[in-house]
Image: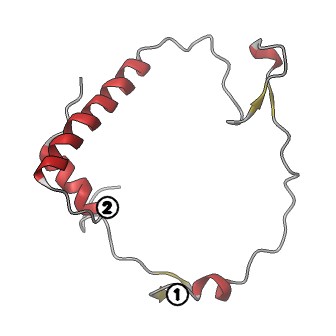
Amino acid sequence: MSKVSKDEIRQLGKLARLSLSAAEIGSLEHELSSILGHMENLAEVNTSDVVPMTHANMSTGADLRPENLQPASLRPDIAQPSLAVESFLTSASRIQDNCFSVPPVLPSGASK
């Protein structure tokens, strides 16, 4: 089972701008390790015969056979004018080159 270290929890807390107590770090260490363990269990499941979904909201009706699953009705994908940039930048605390400007999250020189 994957183990999340206290240092990793502290780093996640720092990135999320959370002040975590020692008790919270200990609790999160256990909880996140448990979640990763569940993900490892799911990774072992054979899904070779599972039909991939095209959308999270599949319409099944009464017939649950994979070949009869269809995507739910979605609105037509028609290009429409979007909001003016100025209308959503009014709430920004910092703007650079007509975009939201946020402080860096990753340390400088971090690989992509």
- 111 relative to 87 in the view: left or right: left
Residue at the image position 72 percent from the left and 35 percent from the top: 57
What x and y, as percent, mark residue 34? Answer: 28, 29
Between 35 and 48, which is closer to the camera in this rendering?
35
Which amino acid, by three-letter code, is at mark 1? Asp
What x and y, as percent, mark residue 28? Answer: 23, 43
Q: Most extreme residue toward the front, as rendered?
A: 23
Residue at the image position 52 percent from the left and 87 percent from the top: 97
Residue 80, compared with residue 44, is above or below; it is below
Q: Residues within 10 Å of mark 2 (few under 14, many from 20)?
A: few
User: Which residue does the numbered mark 2 point to in the structure image?
Assistant: 16
Question: The N terminus is located in which quarter?
Answer: top left
Residue at the image position 46 percent from the left and 13 percent from the top: 45
Which amino acid, by three-letter code, is at mark 2? Ala
What x and y, as percent, mark residue 74? Answer: 83, 45
Q: Which comes before the other along the chain, label 1 or label 2?
A: 2
Residue at the image position 15 percent from the left and 55 percent from the top: 21
User: Which residue does the numbered mark 1 point to in the structure image?
Assistant: 97
| Element at label 2 | loop
* Residue 88 occupies quadrant: bottom right
| Element at label 1 | loop
Between 1 and 27, which is closer to the camera in this rendering?
27
Mark number, residue 60: none
Question: The C terminus is located in which quarter?
Answer: bottom left
